[in-house]
Image (cartoon, rainbow, N blue to C red):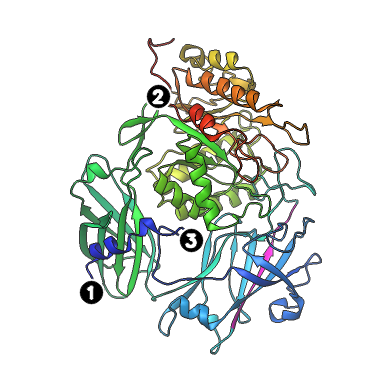
Amino acid sequence: MREDPAELAARLRPSRQDGDHPRPVLVRPQWAPLDGPAGFATDDEGVGLDERWWERPERLDRTITLPFPPESRASGIADERPHPVVWYRIALPAERLAAAGHRPGRRLLLHFGGVDYHAIVWVDGVEAGSHEGGQSPFALDVTDALTGGGPHTVVVRAWDDPYDRSQPRGKQTWRDEPAGIWYQRSTGIWRPVWIESVPPVHVRRILWRTPAAEEAVTAVIELNRRPRRPLPLRLGLAHRGRPLARASAVARERITTVRLTVPGGAGLRWGPEHPELVDAVVAVGDDLVSSYLGLREIGRTPRALTLDGRPVYLRQVLEQCYWPDSLFSAPSARALADEAELVLRLGFNGMRIHQQSADPRLLHWADRLGLLVFGEIGAAHDFDSEAVRRLRREWAQVVRANQGHPSIVCWVPVNESWGFPDIPRRPEQARAAAALARLTRSIDPSRPALSNDGWHHVDSDLLTVHDYDVNPARLRLRYRGRQMERWIAPGVLGPARAFVVVGSDQPVDLPVLLDEFGGVDFRPDGGRGWGYSTVRTRGRFVRRIGELVAAVRASDALGGYCWTQLTDTGQETNGLCDENRRPKAPVQELAAIFGQDPQPPTRAGN
């Protein structure tokens, strides 16, 4: 690369990309999507492997639109019946290879944003690899499988047992029909499929360390393998089109650490009021990638989460990321931008992406808008050794994949004891939940991690409570500091008669968040649906929300909240918006309720 990397970062401005790229924090100049029409077949008898369907295109004779799951209307299939095995046949024409910049001497990576649940991939009849885990992205080097000059073909077999409760599935139902808070399943491919061409030694991941006490950042650059000979490494930073910092090094190992001094970095810190992003370009040997970062350091006091030492009151909303026509798949990249903007317009400063891994394109908009995100994964619903193995493996992949987004401020591997149903009485379940929290911190020590969001904390960095009491007076009393101290203690029953703290190893001098409450169902026509409380008029809807939020904001001890929920989701009709993202009350009225931090207490303990 001849151009100065800081000058190139200033010109490219990767933080201002259009949001289409499936991996916004690591972008190469050329890539090509493979979404669109593809061959498709179900394999309920499980005969496809024996009959070698990857070599028999006539067996994949239906057409599906990727990346939408076959249960969805957007896919063109709209088949909601359980199918344990599905097959895809995806064209890989020469023009897509050219668009991805592929040429002799380079390697072709085939990326999948998500395939539920176990995938085997063939390219031109050659098995290229496999992957287990429906919520973690993966990439395969398919270069050696390409035969001749093309056209080339990708075949995918996806196995997804619809009834396996040991499989991490989140809100996807394990029954034939959705019910309660369980929604329609998503089988097979459900996130973008794409290709990019890379040199034999290339950048796999970039992490940034941005301590608040220093005008410097540290880049941790991870290659796909150790280079056979040292490679020149150049790195440049820019801000709003202005070169900021540059550094050079030599990459001798798989991981290289580079420190850059950032003049004026104290004025470029990232947060909800000032979501400043710094653009970056990294060149290693023949590889060139662009990225971005947010300068911020996450910490905590006994009362609040902090950014750069300043307390932040969390005003989050529960985000199910579910659409009526495309289910858990976003209908478009633009829809994800609109989603993040809707959260901001309604007065929130963050969101809890609930029971699924976050789409990196949504995280990109959270980065740009300054939204504070809790990153989660879909749970298994039985506790056994297979469920623990699956969750541990997939969770580690999700954390590594999304670690570069500054908007993520907390990791949530377990929610409400789902898959860990008896933590207070089953030591093996308590140990497994604590081990997931420790695993999370070992991968990413820069963010807090929860052992079990909402219930039964055994090794959490924050204490979170879920409470759907519909009585504002009871909420106001329960979350007064002196009253709350009585049940934030080991072995003491809290709201809903659940233990918030289990065991003496769990610290209690931590911020307490009410990170699920509300759930008001507004159905003026009295039709089907449900919520945690129901109103019939718009005026009562706004008043009920205002009363509940005011009761929580009156607490002198809470560090924030998460309102349930952003949108109606399937049969669950307790959203602030309907399933098509239309607010149920004027946006300005809702924003006036949610867009306020609490007033400081006039006297401790009041």
Instruction: Please tell me the numbered disc located at residue 20.
Output: 3
Q: Amino acid at mark 1?
A: Arg
Q: Is 164 left or right of 468, judged from the image as shown?
A: right
The x and y percentages for residue 135 are: 58, 54
Q: Is residue 602 visible?
A: yes
> Foreground: 531 or 462?
531
Instruction: Please tell me the numbered disc located at residue 303.
Output: 2
- Magenta span: helix, strand or loop, mainly? strand
Judging by the rendered image, the residue that carries numbered circle 1 is: 2
Cβ–Cβ under 8 Å for marks 2 and 3: no
Q: Amino acid at mark 2?
A: Arg
Instruction: Please tell me the numbered disc located at residue 358.
Output: none
Residue at 35% from the left image edge and 55% from the top image edge: 292
- Of badges 2 and 3, nearer the viewer stands 3
Q: Amino acid at mark 3?
A: Asp
Q: How many other residues sit within 10 Å of disc 3, few (<14), some (14-19) or many (≥20)?
A: some
Q: How many other residues sit within 10 Å of disc 1, few (<14), some (14-19) or many (≥20)?
A: few
Sequence-wise first label, 1 or 3: 1
The x and y percentages for residue 162 are: 74, 53
